[in-house]
Image (cartoon, grey):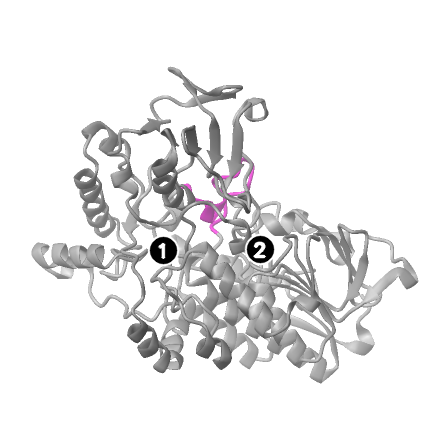
């Protein structure tokens, strides 16, 4: 346990870690409760994910009119999105606008990280140590660190020997990168790579794309937003957002009503074509009710997507290398602008790592099993230690000095994705066991922040010292989340949803798959039942 330095320890009510969508809203709600709160943020300004991910082509894959806060009429009145899928600079500007509107920066400590957080059972408080040597004591700690915020390091021999310029997409230079006249290698074809590759190809003398696993990608069909459309959305925004809250994906679009084989072949093809023309991440998955549960139904959608790839890519061998084989949607489906067509450019070469795996990064490029490729720049689009990495990177210790790393050694266990047994008053925003990464993140974030704020308000009003998940309730929730996942095709793919991209990480399917609406109802029922599954400790008996 961290030593308390007495007078050197700053006493607060709450510490929030992270100043992205989650942390900013959490700070607003804590202020409304009248609590002394601070946010610790490793960047030098607000933004979270949208501060760090400045790579070419970075943008949201949810319609921007829905990828925003709903709690403030002022924000809705004064902000106007310009594109269907907003770019990283526009989303970052939005979060800066939120910070300005609510004067949030005065309670945020920038360029600072939390290195440790220890629960002091004697006082029922947390001791939080920061990278600048400060020690904070607070009753509540909220982990608003994001699900995709701990970059995965490239695990390729020789990475440190490369003499050229190398970049990780999640740590992109603020000033940008000029690839003009340079031979560039991009490693990774997940969402990030698929967004970045077309724009890098427009600059580079030659681009080599190193692909281990091909991915499905839906056309974005991005376009400027007509002002009248935006005004029409805002006129009915409250109703639109309520539909999103009770939906599966956190979006306002009507769910499918029929199974794949309840329609004729011609009608099914027409529905897929309509989705492809509409574009977006759910272009095909919105079509039918059995998309994620029936192998045959999913295979029909797979073949449609593969046929589209063959139509878009001129070279047959390249097209075959780009064809995915996993169940569509079981890895994060990507959204792109001209991704597959990029391989028709004379200055783009696909390196299929299934045929010629990388042996090492060298001083001058990459050596595969069959050749050496000379490069001036390397771009690592290799993803994140998703959902848990940003939390286990901190030395967090709960009751009995048990660390979060130890508690999650066999996979993350939470109750509702909001709290962890033996870690009192430690709250997670969109933690494992919640639907966050399978949904419109902002809708899920708002729900979690509001649940946490209302719970803290209840503790304050009732004179309660701590709340923590019971081990039994946590075990039941983990089993429930697993049962839901196992009824779908999701666990059959080696995805970051179950930690398969991180060597040595326990393979546990982490998201709640039954939709935002059902999840919200389960959380509401827990509160209605007097915080069923939680232990509430009165202030007079806070000691353990």
Residue 208 location, x and y as percent? 37, 29
Q: How far is mark 2 from mark 1, CA to CA?
A: 19 Å
Task: Residue at 30% x, 54% y: name it.
Answer: 220
Q: Main secondary structure of the magenta part?
A: loop
Q: Which residue is outermost to the right?
A: 7
- What residue range appears in magenta? 494-509
**Residue 542: x %, y % from top left:** 79, 71
Mark 2 — residue? 413
- Residue at 40%, 59% (x, y): give it: 86
224 is within the stretch colored magenta: no
Task: State how many labels appear.
Answer: 2
Q: Quadrant of residue 519?
A: bottom left
Q: Rate crowding at label 1 as few (under 14), some (14 to 19) or many (20 or more) other CA atoms within 10 Å.
A: few
Relative to the observer, which residue lies in front, 483 or 441?
A: 441
Q: Are marks 2 and 1 in contact (CB under 8 Å)?
A: no
Which of the 4 quarters of the picture holds residue 536?
A: bottom right
Q: Secondary structure at mark 1?
A: loop
């Amino acid at each position: 346990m961290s030593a308390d330095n007495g007078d050197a320890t700053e006493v607060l009510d709450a510490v929030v870690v992270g100043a992205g969508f989650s942390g900013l809203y959490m700070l607003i709600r804590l202020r409304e409760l009248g609590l002394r709160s601070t946010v610790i943020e490793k960047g030098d300004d607000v933004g979270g994910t949208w501060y760090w991910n400045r790579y070419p082509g970075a943008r949201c894959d949810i319609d921007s009119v829905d990828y925003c806060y709903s709690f403030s009429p002022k924000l809705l009145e004064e902000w106007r999105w310009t594109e269907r899928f907003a770019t990283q600079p526009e989303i970052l500007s939005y979060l800066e606008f939120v910070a300005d509107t609510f004067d949030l920066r005065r309670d945020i400590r920038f360029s600072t990280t939390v290195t440790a957080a220890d629960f002091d059972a004697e006082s029922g408080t947390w001791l939080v140590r920061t990278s600048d040597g400060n020690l904070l004591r607070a009753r509540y700690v909220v982990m608003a660190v994001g699900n995709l915020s701990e970059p995965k390091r490239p695990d390729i021999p020789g990475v440190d020997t490369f003499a050229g310029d190398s970049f990780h997409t999640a740590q992109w230079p603020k000033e940008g990168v000029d690839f003009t006249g340079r031979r560039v290698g991009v490693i990774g074809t997940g969402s990030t790579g698929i967004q970045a590759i077309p724009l890098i190809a427009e600059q580079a003398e030659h681009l080599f794309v190193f692909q281990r696993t091909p991915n499905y990608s839906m056309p974005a069909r991005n376009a400027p937003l007509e002002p009248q459309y935006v005004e029409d959305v805002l006129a009915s925004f409250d109703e639109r957002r309520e539909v999103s809250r009770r939906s599966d994906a956190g979006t306002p679009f009507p769910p499918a009503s029929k199974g794949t084989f309840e329609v004729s072949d011609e009608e099914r093809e027409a529905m897929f074509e309509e989705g492809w023309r509409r574009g977006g991440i759910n272009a095909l998955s919105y079509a039918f009710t059995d998309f994620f549960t029936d192998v045959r139904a999913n295979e029909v959608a797979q073949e449609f997507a593969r046929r589209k790839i063959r139509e878009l890519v001129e070279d047959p061998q390249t097209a075959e290398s780009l064809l995915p084989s996993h169940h569509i949607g079981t890895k994060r489906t990507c959204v792109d602008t001209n991704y597959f067509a990029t391989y028709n450019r004379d200055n783009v070469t696909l390196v299929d790592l299934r045929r010629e795996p990388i042996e090492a990064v060298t001083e001058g490029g990459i050596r595969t099993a069959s050749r050496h490729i000379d490069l001036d720049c390397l771009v690592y689009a290799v993803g994140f230690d998703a959902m848990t990495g940003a939390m286990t990177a901190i030395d967090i210790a709960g009751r009995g000095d048990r660390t979060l790393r130890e508690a999650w050694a066999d996979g993350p266990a939470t109750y509702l994705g909001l709290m962890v047994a033996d870690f009192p008053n430690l709250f997670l925003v969109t933690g494992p066991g919640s639907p966050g990464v399978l949904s419109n993140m902002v809708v899920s974030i708002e729900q979690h922040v509001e649940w946490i704020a209302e719970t803290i308000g209840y503790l304050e009003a009732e004179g309660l010292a701590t709340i923590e998940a019971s081990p039994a309730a946590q075990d039941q929730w983990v089993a429930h989340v697993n049962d839901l996942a196992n009824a779908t095709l999701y666990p059959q793919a080696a995805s970051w949803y179950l930690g398969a991209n991180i060597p040595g990480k326990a393979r546990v399917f982490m998201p709640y798959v039954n939709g935002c609406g059902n999840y919200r109802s389960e959380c509401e029922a827990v509160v209605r039942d007097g915080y069923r599954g939680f232990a509430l400790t009165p202030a007079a008996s806070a000691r353990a």
